């Protein structure tokens, strides 16, 4: 979701105590609160490292992260990360029953983001389609849906069959190597330099749990990077690349990946539909 800088005037109408970022412990509070408040939301992704990375950047300001307290109890927070005039604006997350303080958080954090002092002009946020309350809140504040991408997935209730006649090998790693993905995408001629730069920045913020590299003898023919949110057993395939001439093996590669995710505790897995547009593979795998 995205909007252009509005005319905004600060106002303080709430009696709740608000505190801006003060130190490292506040990042831990932010991550813990996010996990708690989103644990029942469908397809809630694993927290990214964006807040940690942003804190080390020149553009970071303590006013980009605001907490709300009732007494000593943390009841909500809102934050943003930014680069230049672009701001990735967070949502005012609050405990159930404290929805009345969301505007107070929004006024402080959004207000600073779009102020002349900070200089945010283009603001964006991402949500799952099922997160109706969050979408409605941003729409009520002047945001519009500007882009949509479809997810497909399944419940990992059983081990997927990969059959015996597999014509490739694979290696599992607990890290994701961007250059491996880049080499495959460039050989396929599927990305330009601007897209490569954008994806490199994005993947640097993703806390990957594992990746799988696929090989035909010594040649790398595919790579997939996965996150796994342990508290909800939700996994998401965020990096996906297969050399064009070896996409005949795509279904079996995905089976290998799903078995690995399941062995690590995943109960649900999703993919970007654009990575698996083939209807026959979707049907075969039950996606």
Image: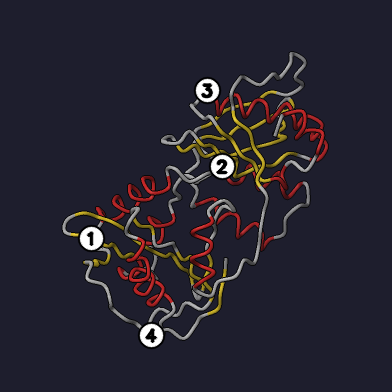
Name the secondary structure under disc 4: loop
Q: Earlier in the sequence, mark 1 or mark 3?
A: 1
From the image, state whether disc 4 or disc 3 is nearer to you.
4
Q: Which mark sits nearer the N-terminus, 2 or 1?
A: 1
Q: Disc 4 and disc 2: Cα gap in Å? A: 45 Å
Secondary structure found at label 3: helix
The foreground one among 16 and 277 is 16
Between the residue at mark 2 and the residue at mark 3, the CA separation in whole angstroms equals 22 Å
Q: In the rendering, at what x and y percent does residue 90 appear? A: 44, 62
**Disc 4 to disc 3, how far (Cα)?**
52 Å
Q: In the rendered view, does 157 fall on the left or right side of 56?
A: right
Residue 263 numbered tag: 3
| Residue drawn at x 38%, y 49% as measured from the top left | 37
Q: Which residue is mark 4?
A: 9
Q: Earlier in the sequence, mark 2 or mark 3?
A: 2
Which residue is disc 1 drawn over? 69
Q: Who's the residue at 69% across and 36% down the image?
A: 222
Q: Which mark is residue 177?
A: 2
Where on the picture, by quarter, is residue 126? bottom right
Residue 31 relative to residue 287: left or right: left
Point out the tag, 4 or 2, that comes first from the N-terminus.
4
**Vertical arrangement, residue 126 with respect to residue 223, above or below:** below
Residue found at the very far top of the displayed protein: 164
């Amino acid at each position: 979701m995205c909007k252009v800088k509005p005319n905004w005037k600060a106002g303080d109408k709430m009696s709740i105590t608000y505190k801006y970022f003060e130190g490292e412990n506040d990042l831990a509070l932010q991550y813990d609160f996010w996990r708690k408040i989103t644990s029942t939301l469908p397809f809630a992704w694993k927290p990214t490292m964006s807040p940690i990375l942003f804190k080390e950047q020149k553009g970071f300001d303590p006013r980009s992260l605001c907490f709300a307290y009732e007494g000593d109890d943390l009841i909500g927070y809102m934050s943003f990360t930014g680069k230049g005039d672009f701001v990735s604006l967070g949502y005012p997350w609050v405990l159930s029953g404290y929805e009345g303080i969301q505007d107070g958080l929004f006024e402080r954090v959004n207000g600073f983001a779009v102020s002349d002092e900070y200089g945010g002009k283009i603001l964006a946020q991402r949500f799952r389609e099922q997160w109706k309350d969050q979408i409605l809140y941003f729409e009520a504040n002047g945001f519009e849906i500007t882009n949509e991408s479809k997810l497909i997935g399944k419940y990992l209730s059983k081990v997927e069959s990969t059959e015996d006649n597999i014509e490739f090998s694979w290696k599992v790693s607990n890290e994701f190597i961007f250059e491996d993905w880049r080499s495959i995408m460039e050989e396929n001629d599927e990305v330009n330099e601007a897209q490569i730069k954008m994806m490199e920045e994005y993947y640097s913020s993703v806390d990957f749990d594992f990746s799988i590299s696929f090989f035909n003898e010594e040649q790398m023919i595919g790579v997939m990077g996965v996150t796994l949110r342990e508290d909800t057993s939700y996994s998401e395939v965020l990096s996906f690349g297969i050399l064009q001439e070896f996409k005949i093996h795509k279904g079996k590669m995905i089976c290998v990946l799903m078995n690995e995710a399941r062995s690590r505790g995943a109960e649900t897995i999703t993919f970007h539909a654009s990575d698996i547009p083939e209807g026959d593979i979707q049907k075969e795998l039950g996606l």
